[in-house]
Image (tube, helix red, strand yellow):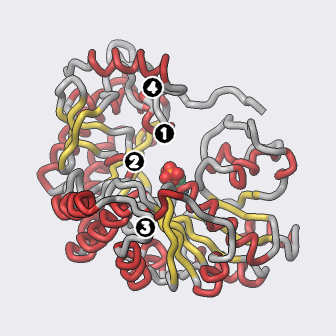
Amino acid sequence: MPDISNSLALWAEAQRLIPGGCQLLSRRPQLFALGESPIFASRAEGPWFWDVDGNRYLDTTMAVGAVLLGYLDPAVESAVDEQRRAGTIFSVIPPVEVDLARTLTRIIPCADMVRFGKSGGEANAVAVRIARAFTRRDRIAFCGYHGWHDWYMAANLNPDSPLDSHLLPDIGAPGIPQALRGTALPFTYNDIDSLASLLAAHPGEFAAIIMEASRTWLPNEGFLSSVQDLAHRHGALLIFDEVVTGFRLALGGAQQHYGVTPDLATFGKAIANGYPLTAIAGRRDLMEFSSGLFVSSTFWDDAASLAAGAATIARMEETGLAEVIAARGRRYIAEWRRLAQPLGEHARITGHPSCAAASFSSRELATLYIQEMARRGVFTGGGFNISLAHGDPEIAVVLAAAEAALHAVQRAIAQGSTQGLLSAAVQKPLFSRRLA
Ligand SMILES: Cc1ncc(COP(=O)(O)O)c(C=O)c1O
């Protein structure tokens, strides 16, 4: 069993110094098997990382999906090194910005032009700003997760807290101005009637429909094109949030994979193999219009991340990455399902093959699975964000650990509890109290 005492000591200090202990909710150790899972990483390479105790883990999370080629991909790192030697930020524009824009407008169906940013939530805030300014309307219909900004969190000013089912339960809307109530309204994935009635209830008032084209659930036949028809019939723009799907489902994103071209789309996470970069892409008239908006930031032209982005996309294109990881993912899902069969309803796996998520009928069982995987040197929260660095041997390591972990879960089901099996703290929901 790995010793994680250095991680635990650092975690105790982090909680005293940093609110929440870190910056991304999905990195908080309460979401894993606290007491058993690694908490701090000191280095990473390919599909592996090493924690501060020197344990090596096969990573299935891959920096929450931000690393699609594997850590320290040689081509990306040498592009960044070269840029670093030349300088990473200037008083004028780095030419690599134009190089990357040229590539993205070639490969992404909706991209006549692109702009750049630093985080996915920020990219969505930019897209929503463009849509509202262009249409001169305020309301946004959404489905899925789109970041932490006010425009999105405003949904929870509604007393039925719609983000419970689109993001996390019990977040509330603390700090969000009441004046935004009714400006962000949810619809249900794969339920076109829920969108139709929302739009019909406020005719001529929606600036945009923003959605993840797929996530844990995949679109029913015709769902995405029906969303597009409805949007345009109501004079609203269609925005795809491709922060997760971008480059993973196809080089041109979910829009290429599903054959539905939105008016605007946002990309993040894997675009620069872990370097901080996002993109907002879209129709020429909208994007040209956006040049007259006050949307601007110092680090958006940072040359190191743009160089990483250019090298990352080139590697994705030359390796046919999306097809490769989808094929590996399909094999992984089929085998995981076979191993989990004896658990029946207690365990399932859903989502696109490149980022399938396993889930369990209780938090105790989920924590037990995560604990058993960690004990066998596999870091997971249940999902598997497959990267190019996860070849057949690495996937075999994950499946061997999953076989043993699923056996432990099966034993817990048979004895009616995790007693004697689980030593980690049971996964805690991050929000358990309404603040507003
Ligand atoms: C679909 C989607 N949109 C937006 C975001 C926010 O991106 P970021 O964390 O880079 O702000 C995420 C983050 O996980 C996401 O999954």
Nearer to us of marks 1 and 2 is: 1
Give whichever of discs 4 and 1 has the lower sequence position.
1
The residue wearing badge 1 is 24
Vertically, is 381 above or below 268?
Answer: above
Residue 318, horizontal then vertical, whole percent:
21, 76
The residue wearing badge 4 is 364
Residue 347, horizontal then vertical, whole percent:
41, 41
Q: Classify mark 3: residues with Cα within 10 Å, few (<14), some (14-19) or many (20+).
A: many
Residue drawn where x is 68% and y is 76% of the image: 292
How far is the residue under mark 2 from the one under mark 4? 22 Å
Q: How many marks?
A: 4
Vertically, is 343 above or below 318?
Answer: above
- Please report contact status of discs 1 and 2: CB closer than 8 Å, yes or no: yes
How far is the residue under mark 3 from the one under mark 2? 14 Å
Circle 4: element type? helix
Q: Amino acid at mark 2?
A: Val
The residue wearing badge 2 is 64
Residue 425, horizontal then vertical, whole percent:
42, 19
Report the quarter where the N terminus lies. Answer: top left
Q: Quadrant of residue 223?
A: bottom right
How far is the residue under mark 4 from the one under mark 1? 23 Å
Nearer to us of marks 3 and 1 is: 1
How far is the residue under mark 3 from the one under mark 4? 33 Å
Circle 3: element type? loop
Residue drawn where x is 53% and y is 70% of the image: 280
The residue wearing badge 3 is 246
Report the quarter where the C terminus lies. Answer: top right
Residue drawn where x is 26% and y is 63% of the image: 86
Q: Amino acid at mark 4?
A: Glu
Q: Depth check: 97 or 435 in front?
A: 97
Residue 85 can be seen, yes or no: yes
Q: Amino acid at mark 3?
A: Gly
